[in-house]
Structures are given as C-alpha cells and as structure tokens.
Image (cartoon, coloured by chain):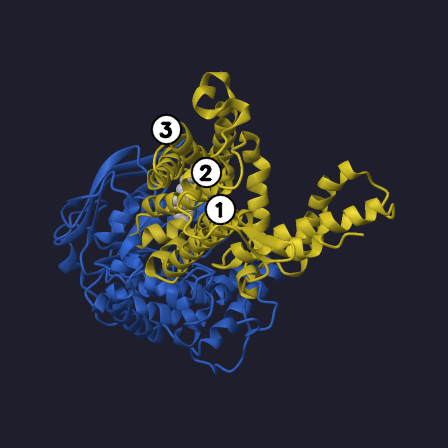
Chain colours: A yellow, B blue
C-alpha cells in the first residue's frame, strides 16, 4: 500500500495552485466580505487575467512585466464594465451581471472566430515560459522525500506566496484604515454611509477593481505551471472560491489563505484515502466516482462549519452573531 | 421651554402655508413626487427658518419621509427646485448634499451593526484623508486627523451617554440607543442643518426627555433643526415653528400654540386616525394599551429598561439588551 499521498497532500499546503486560489479569494473577501458586493463572477476575473497574461506572453511575446501589467489593466477594465451599469442599482444586479459575464467570457474564448488568439477550446500552452526565464535558482531538485521540487517549481512557489503576502499586507492596511471603515460601512447600510457624505458609488467601484485585480493576477498565477483551459473558469470555480472564503471566514484578512489551504489539503487527502479504500475494495465505489465524492466531502465539511462556526475558521464570533 | 425664538423673528407676514421667512436656510419650490397615481409630495413653496427648530408634522402617509428623501437627494422628484443656503440642490447626489452641511437621519434607524459605536461615529467625520484608497495605506498621513476626530467622537458619545459602549458593536445597542447614536453620528460633520426623521419614535419616555434636550442644544450651538414628529406635545415643548403636511401638501404652518388649535390641522389628523387623541404625551404607552398587544407593550417595556442602562434618570447597573438584536451569546466571548 502507498501512503505517499499523506505527505503529498501536505505539499498542497504551499502549492502554487493553493496560492492562486488564496489570492483570488482575497479579492472575493474585498468584494463580498468587506464591501458586501455579491460578485458571482470571480472566475471571470481569473479568466480575463489568465487570457491577458497568456495572449500577451505567448502569442505576442511580451516581456513578463508587460504581461503582468496587461493582466492588471484587463481586470480593471472588466471591473469597470461590470461596475459602471450595476453599482448604482440594487445589490442583486451585480450578482446577475457578474455570473453572466463570467460565462460569456468562457464561451466567447472558445468560439472558432477568436481561436487564432485565444486558442479556442484547446486553450493556450506555455504561458509560464517568460516567468521561468526569470528563475535565479540553480538547476536541479531540492527538498526531501516526495516533497522534492525542481528549481522551477520552487521559484513559482516563492513568487506565488510572496504575491499572496503582498496582497494580504495591502488588504490588512486598507481594512484597518479609514478607507476600510467606509467600505465596511457600505456593507452594513449604504444609505447611511451616503447620508454621511461618502461617495458610495466610487468606493464600491474601487473595491470591485481592487478585488478584481487580485482575481486577475490569481488567474495568471494559476496558469504558470499548467496550460490555460477555458473550461477551468466555469461557474463552479467561483463557488469553490466562495467555499474557501466561508471556510476561512468571509470578513477576515487571513481567512482566504487558511480556507484555500484547508480546501486543497482536504481534497487531496480525501482523494488519497478514497483511493486506498477503493483499491482495497473497502469502499463500494469506482475510481471514476472518486473525483466527485471528494467534493461531497468538502461540501459536508462546509455544512458542518457553517452550523457550528458560521464566522469561519479565523472569523470573530461576534461578526457572525449579528445578521443585520 | 425657554429660549424659544418668537414668531416675529421668524416671519414677517401672517402665518399661512408657504409664508416667507426673514432668514430662510432652505427654500423649496414646486417640489412634487408621485408613485404611480399617488401624489406623495406636492409642495408649492416652503421656507425653513435658519437657526430655529422647525417641526414637520402630519399623519402617517402624509409624505414627510418622502419630502425628506427628496430634499436630501435620496429620491428624485418629478418636478421642483430647492436651495440650501443659496445653493441649488436639485439633482445633487445625497453625499454632496451631506457635504454641504445638510445631514439627515432616518426614520428606520440605520446604525452600522458590525462596526463599533466609535467606528460609526468616526465615519460621520469630514476631511479624513485616510478615506482615500492610496492615502489609507500610509498611516502617518491620516493618524493626526484620526486622533482629532476620535476626541470629538468621544466627547459627543459622552454627551449622549454612549461613551461606555464605544467599543461595542452598534448591533448590540437597544433601539433607543441606536437613535441616539445616529443623531450623534450626524453631528460629527458639524452640519449647518440637521434633519431628523422621527427621532423620538420607538424611544422610551425617559430617553425622550434627554433627546429633546439634545435637540435644544443643537439650536443653542447655532444649528438649524428640521424634525418630523407625530406627537404635538413634544413638538410644543421644543419647536419654534411648526409645518403641517397632509396628503403631500403643506396645509398649515405657524407657531406651535397656534397650529395646534387650527381646525385644518385637527381635521388632517382626525381624518387619518379617528381614534387618536391629538397630542398624547405618552402616546406610545397608551396606544400599546389601547391595542392590548402584549408584543408592543413588551417592546416598550424593554425600551424603558434599555434606557435605564444608559443611566438616564435611573441606576445604570442592569444589563439588558434589546430582544431584537441577537445577543444570545455571552459578552466578551471570542473578543
Ligand atoms: N417607494 C415608494 N413607492 C410607492 N409608494 C410610496 C413609496 N414611498 C412612500 N410611498 C407612499 O407615499 C406616501 C407618503 O409616504 P411617507 O413619505 O413615508 O409618509 P410619512 O413619512 O409622512 O408617514 C404614502 O402613501 C406611502 O405609501
Ligand atoms: Mg415617515
């Protein structure tokens, strides 16, 4: 029997995918947790960021900094397009528009008309090349046991988590500032904040752009170690991010990181455990059913959490206490 | 009460609806708003005197709240213009109206529940540069201003007997305390004019007296007050001038003593509530008794107890939060 899955699962703790999901969820925390904006299209922001990065770096051969800039600009424009018509309206308009916009992006990039740029349903390969070229680490593999990574894998982990760290620091500084106070006030009651002389529309737009840029950068980070696949950006991605957000605690700065780690470690561990059970014929399911069952396990974990700890793992109890 | 501004200092001519004021701060013309076929507001001409306490009264559904919403930019009129201190306010968004110095409160209290009482107050302050996204990142840029407004906030909270609650979430306050917080918060920006929509509603009688004093203090500090109230006795205690609205129109205005005896006013009220005596001082309690509603009575009693917490007229030792706020978990937990 192979118990390697246990250390491998803990490798998920600091995998670049965990970092990318954490970053996208930090964006969602800015939107939903702190400002109260119901963005159901964070997958769309990730897709926009991923495509902006991949197209500029692979198809147009821009240097790395150019592609990063393009990612930020594209996510900002996407946020403005979504926000300008909806942020003056009732909260539910934003959710409908964002969920639709994310699907429009995913379906549009797959159409044959755009496939010379977007790669159609094949997606785009090799978006990580310009990033890997910046790797200053020596060749070879380091680590121990199954947690041995190549020089490129290490570089990606270091940079990915550094970006997450910077995003956390930014959000931390902003949320405890007067800007954060206005944002949290808007979450509670935007008319009250308006009556106190704050331009609520502008603040909501700022929050939408900020969280959207985190989502876009997360989309770019996500495709560094893999190819860009349009179907990775379906609605379920947004709901995974919401799961992570609620696991960690919606209105907390560090919740998204904790949530993302728990999400990926749980997925990976339950996968390993199920494999063991299936191979030993203890669990009466097939290997194909195993994939979806992992998500059932995460779903049940979320339900238990919401019942017993509605504020999330790192949330303050009082935050969940008042459902005002 | 003393210090009432005599009518002769407010108006020049006879007290008819729309009469010109000697020193108006707000002048509204032809302001109308309809919802479908219903004319909610149809104000031909109205002037609010500067530096005085003006009460806007009228039966439920008269259009008082809608008129407030229009004047403060929270709703758009079908027709009309109005000027505040000579500046045209029509089509101006609500936040700009507030910045000009005309700040309102809401009939349904809007305390920001998951912000602390102090944070609620600080949000009311003007000119905090740290509210800019980029400035916010560098604390030294906004720290000084933060200290200054915190000091002002604590002084106001002390005055409103909420200072001991400054670190509590606003959601944990009783209904009456939330009204006080909302009023104190509106004062953070040092407005020229405050507009209070039913500041006394749902507040127990003990707290009502202190609210009346706070409103009188605003006038003493040079502010203009316009407030909505049903109860003529309360209006009679503090208002310098009374404006009566019914079915969207201004039907009467004048000094409180005169307006109360105006047949048109009595008609407007009796037309709406045949069963309500005009100007019942402890109206809430009597209505509750009249309705024989255990629930309403219970709520009012809770209000009274909650009022005791703030130490108004009574010993402040008991701890009894309002049943509406979900404060079932013990305090200090997970803090
Ligand atoms: N948003 C709205 N939509 C439709 N009708 C409304 C709306 N707001 C107020 N009304 C109606 O306008 C009239 C005036 O209401 P309101 O201004 O709240 O009265 P008041 O504050 O004097 O009790 C009422 O008949 C009310 O039902
Ligand atoms: Mg009203």
Classify residue B110 as left or right of residue B334.
left
Residue A202 vertical placement versus B305 (above, below): above
The Cα–Cα distance between marks 1 and 3, rounded to whole angstroms, is: 26 Å
Evaluate if marks 1 and 3 touch, with contact meaning CB atoms under 8 Å apart.
no
Q: Secondary structure at mark 3?
A: loop
Q: Which mark is residue A45?
A: 2
The Cα–Cα distance between marks 2 and 1, rounded to whole angstroms, is: 9 Å
Foreground mark, 2 or 3?
A: 3
* Residue B248: % across, % down: 35, 40
* Residue A85: % across, % down: 38, 33
The one of A14 and A236 positioned closer to us in this rendering: A14
As drawn, the residue found furthest toward the top would be: A113
Query: In which chain is the residue bearing label 3?
Result: A
What's the residue at 41%, 72% (across, down)?
Answer: B166
What residue would you read off at disc 1? A24
* Residue B332: % across, % down: 55, 75
What's the residue at 55%, 69% (across, down)?
Answer: B302
10 Å crowding of disc 1: few (<14), some (14-19), many (20+): many
What's the residue at 35%, 36% (across, down)?
Answer: A70
What's the residue at 50%, 66% (across, down)?
Answer: B172
* Comes first in the chain, label 2 or label 1: 1
* Comes first in the chain, label 1 or label 3: 1
Residue A71 vertical placement versus B1 (above, below): above
């Amino acid at each position: 029997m192979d118990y390697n899955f246990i250390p491998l699962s803990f490798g998920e703790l600091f995998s670049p995918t965990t970092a990318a999901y954490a970053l996208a969820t930090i964006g969602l925390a800015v939107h939903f947790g702190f400002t109260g904006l119901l963005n159901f299209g964070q997958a769309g922001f990730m897709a926009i960021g991923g495509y902006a990065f991949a197209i500029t770096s692979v198809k147009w051969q821009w240097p790395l900094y150019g592609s990063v800039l393009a990612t930020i600009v594209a996510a900002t424009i996407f946020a403005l397009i979504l926000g300008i018509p909806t942020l003056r309206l009732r909260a539910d308009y934003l959710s409908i528009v964002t969920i639709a916009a994310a699907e429009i992006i995913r379906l549009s990039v797959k159409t044959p008309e755009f496939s010379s740029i977007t790669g159609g349903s094949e997606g785009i390969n090799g978006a990580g090349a310009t990033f890997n070229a910046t790797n200053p680490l020596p060749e070879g593999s380091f680590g121990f046991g199954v947690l041995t990574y190549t020089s490129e894998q290490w570089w990606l982990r270091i940079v990915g988590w550094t970006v997450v760290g910077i995003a956390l620091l930014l959000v931390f500084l902003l949320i405890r500032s007067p800007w954060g106070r206005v944002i949290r006030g808007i979450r509670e009651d935007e008319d009250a904040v308006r009556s106190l002389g704050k331009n609520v529309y502008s603040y909501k737009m700022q929050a939408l752009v900020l969280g959207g840029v985190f989502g876009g950068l997360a989309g770019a980070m996500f495709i560094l170690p893999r190819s860009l696949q349009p179907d990775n950006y379906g609605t379920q991605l947004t709901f995974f991010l919401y799961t992570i957000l609620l696991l960690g605690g919606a209105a907390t700065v560090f919740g998204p990181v904790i949530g993302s780690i728990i999400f990926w470690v749980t997925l990976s561990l339950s996968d390993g455990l199920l494999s063991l059970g299936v191979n030993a014929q203890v669990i009466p399911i097939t290997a194909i059913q195993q994939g979806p069952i992992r998500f059932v396990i995460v779903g049940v974990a979320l339900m238990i959490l919401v019942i017993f700890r509605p504020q999330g793992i790192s949330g303050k109890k009082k935050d969940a206490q008042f459902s005002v | 009460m003393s210090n009432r501004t005599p009518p002769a200092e407010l108006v020049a001519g006879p007290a008819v609806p729309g009469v010109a004021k000697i020193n108006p701060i707000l002048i509204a013309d032809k302001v109308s708003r309809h919802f479908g076929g219903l004319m909610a507001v149809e104000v031909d001409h109205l002037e609010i005197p500067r530096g005085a306490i003006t009460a806007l009264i009228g039966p439920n559904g008269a259009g008082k709240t809608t008129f407030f919403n229009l004047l403060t930019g929270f709703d758009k009129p079908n027709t009309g213009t109005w000027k505040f201190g000579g500046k045209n306010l029509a089509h101006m968004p609500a936040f700009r109206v507030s910045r000009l110095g005309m700040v309102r409160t809401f009939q349904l209290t809007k305390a920001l529940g998951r912000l602390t009482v102090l944070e609620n107050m600080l949000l009311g302050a003007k000119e905090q540069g740290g509210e800019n996204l980029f400035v916010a990142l560098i604390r030294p840029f906004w720290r000084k201003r933060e200290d200054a407004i915190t000091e002002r906030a604590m002084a106001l909270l002390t005055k409103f007997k909420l200072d001991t609650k400054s670190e509590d979430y606003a959601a944990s306050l009783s209904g009456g305390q939330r009204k006080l917080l909302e009023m104190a918060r509106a004062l953070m920006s040092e407005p020229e004019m405050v507009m209070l929509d039913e500041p006394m509603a749902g507040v127990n009688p003990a707290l009502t007296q202190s609210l009346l004093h706070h409103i009188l203090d605003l006038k003493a500090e040079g502010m203009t007050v316009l407030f909505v109230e049903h109860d003529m006795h309360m209006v009679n205690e503090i208002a310098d001038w009374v404006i009566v609205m019914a079915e969207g129109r201004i039907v009467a205005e004048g000094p409180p003593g005169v307006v109360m005896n105006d047949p048109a006013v009595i008609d407007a009220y009796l037309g709406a509530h045949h069963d309500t005596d005009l100007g019942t001082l402890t109206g809430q309690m009597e209505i509750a008794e009249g309705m024989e509603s255990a629930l309403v009575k219970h709520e009012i009693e809770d209000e009274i107890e909650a009022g005791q917490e703030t130490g108004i007229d009574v010993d402040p030792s008991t701890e009894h939060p309002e049943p509406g706020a979900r404060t079932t978990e013990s305090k200090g937990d997970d803090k």
